[in-house]
Amino acid sequence: MLVDPCSGIGFSLDGKPLDKMSEFSSPLFIPSFVIKDDYLTISTPEIKNVIDFSPDILTSNQPDKLKLFDAISWDKLDIVKTLVEKDKILLSVRASVGCNVVHLAASKSKELLSY
């Protein structure tokens, strides 16, 4: 049995609610899976559209240095390129903890780091 810690409702292992006491007792979503030997493989549906919820960094009122940090944090290579092409000095800025943009980019993607 699985128990939802918020509602306290119990569910059977196939995701069906054991209690039909409230609107919170709807069946759980259980993805397709395969158990082979000691390995669990969970299937995911094909993703057709990705919605970008990142902020509109270029239109913000922040200084370009902070825009660059935000663009790196959100892994937005196109925005990083736009900011750096506008002002190459941004490549030498450092965060308050002393790391530079290369350090920040290294924690994101190979493409961003390569640029």
Image (cartoon, rainbow, N blue to C red):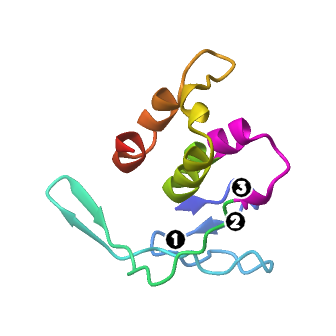
Q: Which mark is residue 12?
A: 1
**Badge 2 is on which residue?**
9
The residue shown at (34%, 45%) is: 110
Amino acid, disc 1: Ser
- On the image, numbered disc 3 is attached to which residue? 57
> Residue at coordinates 76% horizontally, 61% vertically from top-left?
7
Our reading of the magenta stretch's main secondary structure is helix
What residue sits 69% from the left and 19% below the top? 96
Magenta-drawn stretch contains 56 = yes
Please report the residue visible at 47 percent of the width from the left and 27 percent of the height from the top.
Answer: 103
Most foreground residue, 49 or 74: 74
Numbered disc 3: secondary structure: helix
Of callouts 1 and 3, which one flags the residue occurring earlier in the amino acid sequence?
Answer: 1
Mark 3 and mark 2: Cα distance apart in space: 43 Å
Neighbours of disc 3 within 10 Å: few (<14), some (14-19), many (20+): some
What's the magenta region?
A: 55-70
Q: Residue 108, image x and y in percent?
A: 45, 42
